[in-house]
Image (cartoon, grey):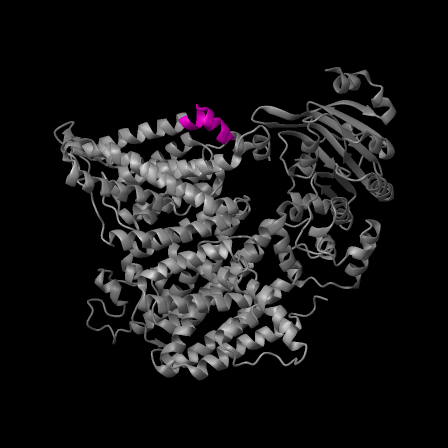
Amino acid sequence: MQQANPASTPRDFLLSVEGLTVSFDGFKAVNDLSFYVDENEIRVIIGPNGAGKTTVLDLICGRTTATEGSIRFRDKELTRMKEHEIVHAGVGRKFQNPSIYEDLTVFENLELSFPRGRGVFGALAFKRDKEVIDRVEEIAEMIFLRDQLKTEAAILSHGQKQWLEIGMLLIQSPELLMLDEPVAGMSVSERVKTAELLHQIIKDHSVIVIEHDMKFVQDIAHRVTVMHQGKVLSEGSMDHVQHDPKVIEVYLGH
Amino acid sequence: MIGDYTLVEFSSILAMQGFAGLILFSVFVLMALGLAIIFGQMGVINMAHGEFMILGAYVTWLCSHFVTAYVPALFPIYFFIAMALAFLASGALGMLVEWAMIRHLYKRPLDTLLATWGLSLILQQLYRSVFGAREVGVSLPDWMMGSIALTDIIEVPINGIFVMVLTMLISLGVFILMFRSAWGRRVRAVVQNRAMAGAVGINTKKVDRVTFGLGCGVAGVAGSAFTMIGSTGPTAGQLYIVDTFLVVVFGGAASLIGTIASAFTISQAQSTMEFFMSGSMAKVLTLLTVVGILMLRPEGLFTLKMRR
Amino acid sequence: MNATLYTRREWIALAVLAALILIVFPATMDIFRLNLVGKYLTYAFVAAGLVLCWGHGGILSLGQGIFFGLGGYCMAMFLKLEASSPENTAIQSTPGIPDFMDWNQVTELPFWWIPFKSFPFTLAAVIVVPVVFAYIIGAAMFKRRVGGVYFAIITQAIAAILTILIIGQQGYTGGVNGITDLRTLLGWDIRTDSAKFILYFVNAALLIVVLLLGQAVRVSKFGRLLIAMRDKEDRVRFSGYSVADFKIFIFCLAAAFSAIGGAMFTLQVGFMSPSFVGIVPSIEMVIFAAVGGRLSLFGAVYGALIVNWAKTSFSESFPELWLFAMGGLFIAVVMAFPNGLAGLFRSHVEPLLAKLTRKSPPPPAPDATPAEAVKLAAE
């Protein structure tokens, strides 16, 4: 089971993805991909449509099973774990379209993600005590929804729904957050606030973000990984990848 | 010697059993084809499918009476007329149902299931009120009676052969319609990406209605063919609905070839086992095996691995 | 906040319901009618299970008759063995075994019947057998992420298989007639009026216990997770929950509720047969929950009462109309009022009541007519 070769991880990365491959009926959506994420790093993955960005997140969080390769998170091999176990290990995932419980209130949405009573009987015995309420309020403050706690999630604006889902991840206290296009469909002022939120989040989390909005990427990224046809095309600072001829070729060439 | 039979007798019995299985196979295929179109292409569970089939059977029955009474000259070929009428009647009813009911429920598959069950109850009672509770049978033209002797022991009934040939032709027709015609391309486009299909100018609502109507029409033809090998009652449709759903799901909902292959497997398994045990136990074992396999392989036998 | 089991309004609804089935019905009905109502109420157990499983969790089981039947058959096997004492069956070629076995040339009690001579075993089996069965089905399907219409069809197929099996193996199961001619429970004759009266109350009390249990699940975090799973299963999974475990649990709980109903059915009606197991009874059980309101536990009780009452009176006087009515009901609860009576009460009666009670706040009178009470008690 322990496939990762320790020699290949010279430093203690939070997340090491190595030789990751997944094929759907012969089509390799992700092909021999390797990258490493540090503690408290914001890593942005960019790339043209169909480059395999979302599939990478799916593989890390267990939604899709890898054909080959390894994903090590701290000292755990994620490729063999079930989705909820990966969450327990400390990986949170936000989906591209806001995925929240529309029939429940903002408070209940956050409460359900609070990391306690996750078993069947734990959930039956779960009590909404002060610890839970305080934590929900604290997170709600962070995601600008302090005044909407009792609002049914269905009637939030699109941007607020995105924040709520980020909040639902934060309350899980994950070490690594994965956000798939968090500012898609947001207004300019909402984008600014989201960037602010992300800067606050990385104080004690690592973050992987998929994003198309280059201005936003420039604003938040520590390092950028450019994907193309399931592989890493280029990696480095925003400045570095912007001037990489291979990247320019892919984005502007054809 | 096998048991009390000689080898020749035993193999003949197996062959006859196999032939009985082929007739069951034809019924399954005919019913499942319409269901596979509706469920596989539209994702709609039509619990009233059996009743659409029975409508076709009643149309055939009416037609046989009408022809015998007024135009006996047409009797030898009335089946072909009846089948066309059955297709039209069931198809028209299907389009009406789609317009009145199904189109409001596309996003609620479980509710569609309940609503169409309600429809099936209403249709059953309607048949009972109009045609009576007794089972009715049609009279076969002379050329369809009797059987062909293949060997001294093996005889195959002509109506059985006719139904099988018919099944093949209808399957072929549906296949060509769905996979080789412009209209079939439109249906598949709508299945794969409704919004995009709408954007490139396909009238998705019309495609839905016609697809549903087509599935029901094929069920009507199935009912018409059904009258050649059995009698028809108001609740006959319900008898087959679960088997047929299992056939469709087992074959992999979106695959017509899969549907046919699974109909073949299930019908042969059942009729072969019927030789060794009671009919009910054969059915229990067959269905249990299918359910068991579906639990292990829920996507059915013939589904491509999908990117989720 | 969530420490209370019921809001004030729900307490009133519960009080009205309890008063109706514990006081009003027994006080106003003769024993024949009361026994009939008792029979209807056994279906309310199934409907309550479906409210949790289908209404809240989005898992539509078209096989609740399986569990109703298994619970009922377990109870019937015990009663049948008691009725088949060697003295009672002296005229049989093999005395001491159930009559239908004797008729089918079975000469020895099958081994799996033997434990049902024990009443404690039977009581345990009434719950355990259906729950284990539900666990196997649930684990096989939910662990592989089979849900929605596939789950519905598979459960329906299993209900069909079980029916064919019971009918086919008549030497061991009593076949299509079922297990009939049940007489005594531990020597107590269950066919007398007084026994029927007492059993009615046992049944009603059990139903209220089940409703309280169901409500406890509903208001817990588990209940909110059910709704969350129905809406966004993946989000629940990626919030660290093993979705399959939750589905299996609620499916087993619904099975247990149904089984209690089935056992009480056998006791009150005096027989059990495959006609309560198969496709048709199973899907009818869904309509009880749908008519009451798929999200309302109390509604399930009223749904079971009203639909069955209508079925009995229609089939007596206009048997042809009943299937039309039933069919129409299926279509109507889906298309016109998806939240059933509970939903109608919320949107139409409640505002009216609020207007009235602003002047005079007493709770609704316990002797409300059934029709009014339905609307009052549906949450």
* Pick the front one: B215 or B19: B215
* Pick the front one: B242 or B128: B128
Depicted C28 relative to depicted A235: above or below: below
Depicted A229 relative to depicted C192: above or below: above
* Residue shown at the point (28%, 30%) measured from the top left: B166
Depicted B164 relative to depicted C210: above or below: above
* Pick the front one: A161 or A5: A161
What quarter of the picture does the N terminus of chain C occupy? bottom right
Whether residue B179 appears in magenta in the rendering, the answer is yes
* Extreme residue toward the front, this view: B70
Q: Is residue C216 left or right of residue C34?
A: right
- Main secondary structure type of the part rendered in magenta: helix
Residue C300 in the image, given as x and y percentages of width and height: 51, 65
Residue C366 in the image, given as x and y percentages of width and height: 54, 80
Whether residue C85 appears in magenta in the rendering, the answer is no
* Residue shown at the point (46%, 47%) measured from the top left: B100
